[in-house]
Image (spheres, grey):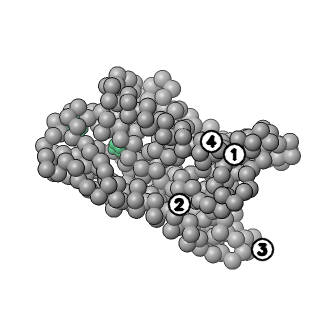
Amino acid sequence: MPRMHRDRVTKTPRERRHGRIRLTVQIMAAAVMNGYAAGFLRGKIYTGKSKAVCVPVLNCYSCPGALGSCPIGSMQAVAGGGKHKFSFYVLGTLMLFGTVLGRLLCGFLCPFGLIQDLLYRIPLPKLSMPKAADRLLRYLKYAVLVLLVLLLPVLAVNRFGIGDPWFCKYVCPAGTLEGGIPLILRNEQLKNLADTLFSWKLGILAAVMTGAVFISRCFCRYLCPLGAFYALFNRFALYQMHVSEQACIGCGKCEQVCPMAVDVTKHINGTECIRCGKCKAACPTQAITSGFLRQPNQQKGTNHGTES
Ligand code: SF4
Ligand code: SF4
């Protein structure tokens, strides 16, 4: 059974400083990617040239402020089109970002990640998932990626040979929040078109947002297809984290603060770490370090964060 608990609230100055910096980066990234303010007022999406460029995180194409395209949406749109092409441009972009940063993108740049982080700050008791269920549910996001993003748009087609963007159309809560709701609020025509499907999507959004209040980053952990994609790169990405065996005193503070419930001292470079840096800020002995292509604390100890 899931257990309710109170989240640790006392933070050190180092943790507070890190929290402020990360929040600022997250807000700035969301604002830059959705900087077309006029779109929110008019209830219309931006259609300028920058829309041909993919952003590296989940950010709905139909958000009235979006200046770029969502990679997951683009991939489905190309795959589901009449010619069922594969978008090498999108795949290449994602692989490049994954190879350099891994899931740092989830921890610092994703607007839907920011929304979940803010929801988790609501001071209500938090839920600890039983380990077995948590481990099983984490595989769901890979099923979402393979089935809803890659296969169904190509295989389930109409009589014209065109497939639906299954993830965007039937699941994506970020799309409902950033695109569907603002457009419907400002656009009378669209308001009249809101149907059962939109109600279904609202239900999914409500479930995910409620979940995020009690389970940190629940969408990233269990459902996000882009998180699943970047997870595959974490172990090999240029950006890596390290735990010094000699400096670590086994106090467990890193694991208490980790929003992804990572076994920090053993699997910090595994698939689930979103590189948020909270463990690094909380560690009293500064045993955790991070950086590009280097293992900063190897002189002091061994890097043992290589398993997923
Ligand atoms: S292991 Fe550290 S950096 Fe990774 S998600 Fe957990 S707290 Fe964030
Ligand atoms: S917080 Fe630092 S010292 Fe404590 S267990 Fe984690 S890595 Fe080790």
Image quadrant holding the N terminus, namely top left
Q: Nearer the viewer, mark 2 or mark 3?
A: 2
Q: From where the camera sits, is residue 176 visible?
A: no
Residue 5: % across, % down = 39, 27
Q: Which residue is mark 1?
A: 36
Quadrant assignment, res 10: top left
**Which badge, 1 or 4, comes first in the chain's sequence?**
1
Q: Which residue is mark 2?
A: 145
Marking on residue 159: 3
Q: Please name the amino acid that badge 2 sits on.
A: Leu
Question: What secondary structure is found at the residue carrying circle 1?
Answer: loop
Q: Residues within 10 Å of mark 2 (few under 14, many from 20)?
A: many
Q: Nearer the viewer, mark 3 or mark 1?
A: 1
Front position in the image: 56 or 273: 56
| CB within 8 Å, label 1 to label 2 | no
Q: Is residue 150 above or below residue 21?
A: below
| CB within 8 Å, label 1 to label 4 | no
**Which badge, 3 or 4, comes first in the chain's sequence?**
3
Instruction: Give the Cα distance between marks 2 and 4.
Output: 18 Å
**Residue at position x 48%, y 40% from top?**
25
**Residue at position x 31%, y 35% from top?**
281
| CB within 8 Å, label 2 to label 3 | no
| CB within 8 Å, label 2 to label 4 | no
Instruction: Give the Cα distance between marks 2 and 3.
Output: 25 Å
| CB within 8 Å, label 3 to label 4 | no
Q: Please name the amino acid that badge 4 sits on.
A: Leu
Q: From where the camera sits, is residue 56 visible?
A: yes
Question: What secondary structure is found at the residue carrying circle 2?
Answer: helix
Q: Please name the amino acid that badge 1 sits on.
A: Tyr
